Image (tube, grey):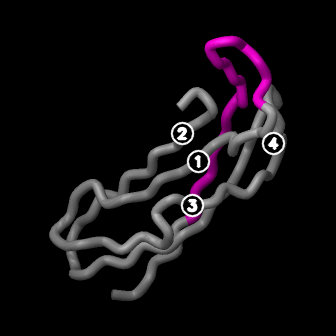
Amino acid sequence: NTPLALDMFVADDALFSSGTNATPNQTPPIVELVVNKYRGPGPVTVGKGHEKVTTLKGGKLEEDFQGKASTTVTFSQPGAYVVHVTANDLSG
C-alpha cells in the first residue's frame, strides 16, 4: 500500500495526417500516456491514469518529440504485477 514512483519516457516523430491533410487549428498533445494494471493478484491504483507528458524536446507538429511523465502506482497486496503503459500519438 505504499505508492511507488513510476517515470516514463517517450519519443515520437510528431507526424500528423488527417483525411484532408489540413493542419489543425490547435495542436493536440503530441503523445498521451495511459497507465493501467495488466495482471497481478490484486487491484492497482494508478495516479491519474492519463498522465500529462512534459515536453523535453520538440512539441510542435512534424518536429521530433521527446517527453517524460511521472505517476505513482499503489499495489493492494504483495505479488508479481505487470503494469501496462499505452502511448498514443497524433495518429491515434
Q: Is residue 4 above or below residue 33?
A: below
Q: Earlier in the sequence, mark 4 or mark 2?
A: 4
Q: Which mark is residue 61?
A: none
Crowd rating for badge 4 (residues with CA inside 10 Å; few <14, some 14–19, many 20+): many
Crowd rating for badge 3 (residues with CA inside 10 Å; few <14, some 14–19, many 20+): some
Spatial separation of the CA atoms under disc 1 and disc 2? 5 Å
Q: Which residues are magenta?
A: 7-24
Q: Amino acid at mark 4?
A: Gly
Could you tell me if the residues under marks 3 and 4 are in contact, i.e. CB atoms within 8 Å? no
Pointer 4: what residue? Answer: 59
Could you tell me if the residues under marks 1 and 2 are in contact, i.e. CB atoms within 8 Å? yes
Spatial separation of the CA atoms under disc 1 and disc 3? 7 Å
Spatial separation of the CA atoms under disc 4 and disc 2? 15 Å
Q: Earlier in the sequence, mark 1 or mark 3?
A: 1
Label 3's element? strand
Q: Which mark is residue 32?
A: 1
Pointer 2: what residue? Answer: 88
Q: Amino acid at mark 3?
A: Glu
Spatial separation of the CA atoms under disc 2 and disc 3? 12 Å
Pointer 3: what residue? Answer: 51
Taking 60 as reference, is 46 left or right? left
Q: Earlier in the sequence, mark 1 or mark 2?
A: 1
